[in-house]
Image: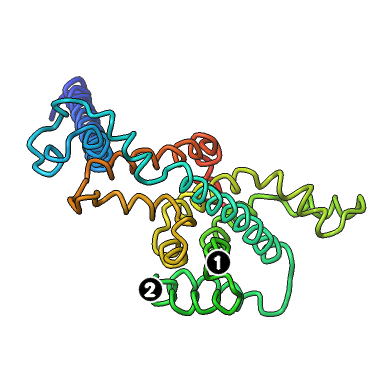
Amino acid sequence: MQSVPSQLSNRTTSTRSSYVSLLIAKLAGKLLLWVFLLLMVVFTVFPVIMAVLGSFKTNAEVTTGATFWPSVWQFNNYVKAWKGANFAHFTMNSLFVSIVTTVGSLLVASLAAYAVDRREFAGKKVYVALLASTMFISIGAVVLRPQFELMVHLNLHKSLWGVVIILISGHAATFFTLIGFFKGIPRDLDEAAMIDGCNVYSIYWRIILPLLAPGLGVAGLFVFRNAWNEYILPLVFTMTKPALQTLTVGLASLRYGTSAAAETHIMLAGACMSILPILVVYILANKSFISVTAGSVKG
């Protein structure tokens, strides 16, 4: 039989080996996690870097792809893109569509989420199910024709308001995002406000909306981005009125120059400038964007 000191020594050695194995497993897990995250960053950021660098190259350098860095930095590409795409005018059209769509979608979706979460009414489950189904059947070209025909009957087929109304009507994703945040607002606040004499609308405006600010920031960021990047709807609705084109439609015209030759470098310059408003909106909604995890967990 082994002596007591030998048994203690064996146990200590075994404990150390288990601790070392556990430490190695943790370090390997962290290493794999960091490798995965770095790969995701590379795959996400690399195309953006290539687009930015391509916007400073000549068209020949972009087409051949022979160089990573521009041999001579072509800052004049941005001047040509600004003038060629009528950038200032089309940017104002895009801002109009994006801002009005964002405000309208947040208003409609927050009211709908407030009614569904706080009120009881007949057919509530059916309404939520129908709203959820619109997230799967709105598949671009399939619904584009009926949407356009509806706007023709409303005499809005030659106006950006037709685009705005259609984009606001697709607020299902915003609705379900805000529902998650509504779950985190105590119902006791509603009851206390009613005791103080507030009605349903006062509670929504004075109590719910201020507390819903993080959710509105998160949802507004996605709505603004989608409206800003929308291409098909503005293209269809502005075919007969080029002055109403948004920036995404205007940038497509930079693809070919006056000699019908592809000018990818000019289009890349315009695309880089079009990213700036999205970055500004993200910076403004950054704090709200971070809280999206809390809203999703509570939902």
Seen at 41% across and 63% down, the residue is: 235
Q: Residue furthest top?
A: 5
Foreground pick, 231 / 81: 81
Seen at 47% across and 45% down, the residue is: 91
Position of 150 relative to 276 (above/below): below
Please state which amino acid type lies under the numbered disc 2: Ala
Horizontal side, residue 189 vs residue 145: left or right: right
Give the residue at mark 2.
141
Q: Work out whether residue 169 can be spotted.
A: yes
Residue 8 occupies quadrant? top left
Foreground pick, 2 / 221: 221
Position of 131 relative to 49 (above/below): below
Label 1 SS: helix
Quadrant of the frame with the C terminus: bottom right
Give the residue at mark 1.
162
Horizontal side, residue 60 vs residue 242: left or right: left
Please state which amino acid type lies under the numbered disc 1: Gly
Q: How is the image coloured?
A: rainbow
Name the spot of residue 233 as percent of width and height, x first: 44, 64
